[in-house]
Image (spheres, grey):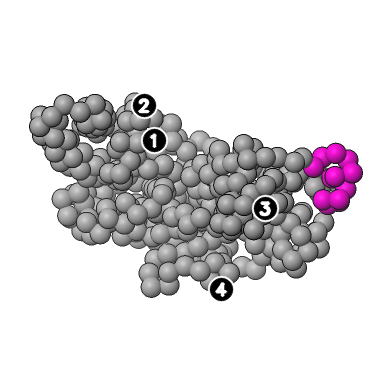
Amino acid sequence: MSLRVGIVGLPNVGKSTLFTALTKKQVDCANYPFCTIEPNVGMVKVPDERLGALARISHSEKIIATTVEFVDIAGLVRGAHEGQGLGNKFLSHIREVDAIVQVVRAFENKDIVHVEGRVDPRSDAEVVNLELIFADLATVEKRLDAAQRELKAGVDREKQKRVLALEKVQAALAGGKLAREAILTPEEMESVRELQLLTMKPMLYVMNVDEAGLKDAGHLSPPVDGYPSVVICAKLEAELAELSETEVKEYLEAAGIPLTGLDQLIVAAYKLLDLITFLTSGEKETRAWTVRRGATAPQAAGVIHSDFEKGFIRAEVINWKDFVESAGEAGAREKGLARLEGKEYVVKDGDVCHFRFSV
């Protein structure tokens, strides 16, 4: 499952520094193919402590984590929706991603001039969001005009629903809200999905602070109320990315934190996409697989191979903790902790699965 997260922000907020740190954590492209034609794309592993625990029990030869692809999108300036700066390129690249990570600046540095002349995370977010809103408003109004003309040509229930949905989204955008804040029914949501509206995408904010700011991170207000945010010192993360895994582990232990800010961002982006992880574990490999929340057992099997979904018979499922505490699959079976599930089973995060299928 190819999942792309776009990193956006104003100039000089630390976006490129953050992306540089991410690309240094990039996985081996021999294991995870990605398009090398675009140097602004990096695929990184999603941190998951469960993999190591399972691999030790199964004596796995290798561990393969699930991944998220990050895209460093051209910087935005005020007026981007009218083509200012690299506006058109910026907007077209955002349409191609599944979610948005928006970097805002929360650090002072007289040597790095802020494009807006002041450091204000909320204002940064307002500028970026307004540009996205204006771009979406132009798209919606154009489509709404066409839909209304079609409706005049002949009454059609589906066309009426589409016009109503577009009017709701238009009203939200005109009121300065993101499209995803419009109150739509599932049917209405489906009718506007093809527009690929920028502000309909899930959004996460990164507050880029200096090292001193990390100590006061708990006192920082989110750039936009109601949206998830992560506090990171991009400069420090870029430095940590240069260290070995052992050195980073020692740093984390000394600082008393479980994950680097970068790893926290990767995990948060993964959750933002409403994804869960199921696992497979054996002597050959222990591996994490990605599915959308709500996926059934056959759909999960299809992520491994399409033939698994077509010929799905059943799945043997063990919670990862039960797998570890029972010293593996056989032990879990003896304790009655292994379950046989059918086609209707909804896969849960942390399920260790063994699929049975017919050829």
The mark nearer the N terminus, 4 or 1, is 4
Dot 2 amino acid type: Thr
The magenta stretch is 327-338
Residue 271, placed above or below residue 266? above
Residue 334 placed where, x, y %?
A: 89, 44
- Name the residue rendered at 33%, 41% in the picture: 193
- Mark 2 lies on residue: 185
- Image quadrant occupied by the C terminus: bottom right
- Mark 4 lies on residue: 30
The answer to which of 268 and 218 lies nearer the viewer is 268
Q: Are marks 4 and 1 in contact (CB under 8 Å)?
A: no
Dot 3 amino acid type: Phe
Give the foreground label among 4 and 3: 3
| Residue neighbourhood size for the residue with mark 1, other residues' Cα within 10 Å, grouped as few (<14), some (14–19), many (≥20) | some
Mark 2–mark 3 Cα distance, whole angstroms, equals: 37 Å
Residue 23 placed where, x, y %?
A: 49, 65
The mark nearer the N terminus, 4 or 3, is 4
- Mark 1 lies on residue: 224
Mark 1–mark 3 Cα distance, whole angstroms, equals: 47 Å
The mark nearer the N terminus, 4 or 2, is 4
Dot 4 amino acid type: Ala
